[in-house]
Amino acid sequence: MEDTLFDKILRKEISADIVYEDDWVLAFRDIHPQAPIHVLVIPKKKWAGFQAFQSASPEEVGRYIQGVSAVAHALGLDENGYRIVWNQGRDGQQTVAYVHAHILGGRSLHWPPG
Ligand code: 5GP
């Protein structure tokens, strides 16, 4: 698999504004925020995209989803809510081949998205 920017952030070779870390996930602020709070959550177990989940361990996928929820909680977003976005593949505008959830919050978000 391609060694991506997010592999390097996970290995702490590239600096990032890390807001949360546990055994399963790392979360850091997006460098081009699209909302007052815009945080990316990556699993420590690397998957390039959602297609990998078809053969992934349910335990590891579940831990990742629980991690995304924990990050939103740590950011203080539980009460007002937030949006989670996973861009997938070319048409989904995924630019980094390492699964990453965007957590967007801190204001009322528009719907539908483009
Ligand atoms: P994607 O478009 O793949 O869903 O999301 C990739 C995200 O990574 C984009 O929102 C982009 O702003 C963010 N990004 C790109 N380069 C960097 C970087 O060097 N540091 C951080 N923290 N975010 C980045």
Image (cartoon, helix red, strand yellow):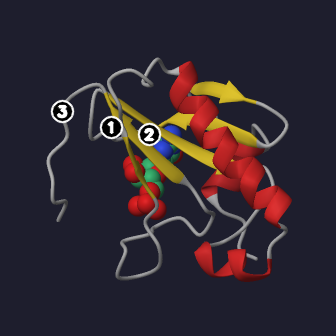
- Residue 114: x, y in percent? 17, 65
Residue 93: percent from left, percent from top: 36, 71
Residue 76, disc: none
Please name the residue that numbered disc 1 is placed on.
33
- In the picture as drawn, the residue positioned furthest to the front comes out as 79
Mark 1 is on which residue type? Answer: Pro
Q: Secondary structure at mark 3?
A: loop
Instruction: Note whether 62 is above or below 37 in the view shown.
Output: below
* Residue 101, percent from left and from top: 52, 52
Does 35 appear above or below 9?
A: above
Q: Is residue 95 left or right of residue 109?
A: right
- Residue 22 in view in this figure: yes
Pointers 1 and 2 in contact (CB under 8 A)? Answer: yes
Given this view, does label 3 or label 1 mark the residue nearer the observer? 3
**Residue under pointer 2:** 30
* 2 or 3: tag closer to the N-terminus: 2
**Position of residue 99 in the picture relative to residue 92 (left or right):** right
Residue at (56, 34) in percent of width and height? 28
Circle 1 crowding by C-alpha within 10 Å: few under 14, some 14–19, many from 20: few
Instruction: Confirm or reject: label 1 Cβ below 8 Å from ligand 1.
Output: yes
